[in-house]
Image (tube, grey):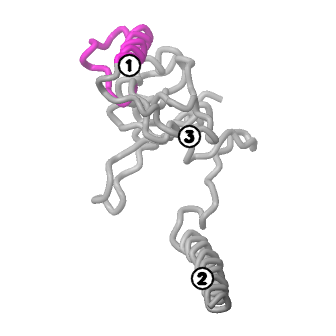
Amino acid sequence: MKSIVWKSIKITLVFCVFFSLCYIFVLWAFAKVAGPGNGNAEVVTLNGKVVGAANVGQKFTKDIYFWGRPSAADYTADASAGSNKGPTNPEYLEEVEVRIDTFLVHHPYLKRNEVPAEMVTASGSGLDPHITPQSAEVQIKRVAKARGMQEDKVRKIVEENTEAPLLGLFGTAKVNVLKLNVALDQQNK
């Protein structure tokens, strides 16, 4: 009886190891074939120097830059997560109010109800690299003034860096904040 149980355990372990490795291989192969950048992270460079990964949000706080979504993980990839605070949590609501007030200080031309929700609420991962074109639009005036540029010129750069939905159907239009800020820096050389 012991030998039958032991053989069953051995067989189960072999299958677990085999299928675990197969699963990893299938995911790797799929990423190489169908993933963006052949499964490798897309890095963004400025003047020949890597400034970040396009798929990981970064913290921008200067007025010359577009800002991304707040991060509950403070943009630390190893701590990637949401805050787990619900929409009725008093501490969370206080954080959102502080973010709204800060946003309005830097965007005095906006009314409180014009602040995009995504600009004051953290994403689920805490590392979202994108904002909506609408969130970029409300920041154009601030960025243009801080850079000494015409608003139309900044708006054009935003439009050039707006990614359409996949096949025009799936998802929403989005703007990669890092790529947009690098494009602005390249324009201001």
User: Looking at the image, do the residues carrying marks 1 and 2 touch, with CB atoms under 8 Å apart?
Assistant: no
Q: What number is the disc on residue 80?
A: 3
Q: Residue at x 27, y 12 (%)?
A: 111
Kindly identify the amino acid type of the residue bearing the numbered disc 3.
Ser
Give left or right: position of 21 versus 171.
right
The residue indicated by pointer 1 is: 96
Q: Position of residue 12 (x, y in %)?
A: 60, 82
User: Looking at the image, do the residues carrying marks 3 and 1 touch, with CB atoms under 8 Å apart?
Assistant: no
Which residues fall within the magenta stretch?
Answer: 90-119
Give left or right: position of 111 versus 34.
left
Kindly identify the amino acid type of the residue bearing the numbered disc 1.
Val
User: Looking at the image, do the residues carrying marks 2 and 3 touch, with CB atoms under 8 Å apart?
Assistant: no
- Is most of the magenta stretch helix, strand or loop? helix
Q: What is the quadrant of residue 113 in the picture?
A: top left
Q: Position of residue 109 (x, y in %)?
A: 33, 11
Label 3 packing within 10 angstroms: few (<14), some (14-19), many (20+): some
Kindly identify the amino acid type of the residue bearing the numbered disc 2.
Thr
Give left or right: position of 95 versus 73.
left
The CA span between labels 2 and 3 is 34 Å
The residue indicated by pointer 2 is: 12
| Disc 2 versus disc 3: nearer the observer | 2
Label 2 packing within 10 angstroms: few (<14), some (14-19), many (20+): few
Q: Is residue 97 magenta?
A: yes
Label 1 residue SS? helix
User: Along the polypeptide, which appears first: circle 1 or circle 2?
Assistant: 2
Q: Is residue 29 above or below residue 126?
A: below
Q: What number is the disc on residue 42?
A: none
State which quarter of the image contains the C terminus. Answer: top right
Q: Residue at x 63, y 87 (%)?
A: 11
Q: Residue at x 40, y 40 (%)?
A: 159
The single residue placed furthest to the left in the displayed view is 113
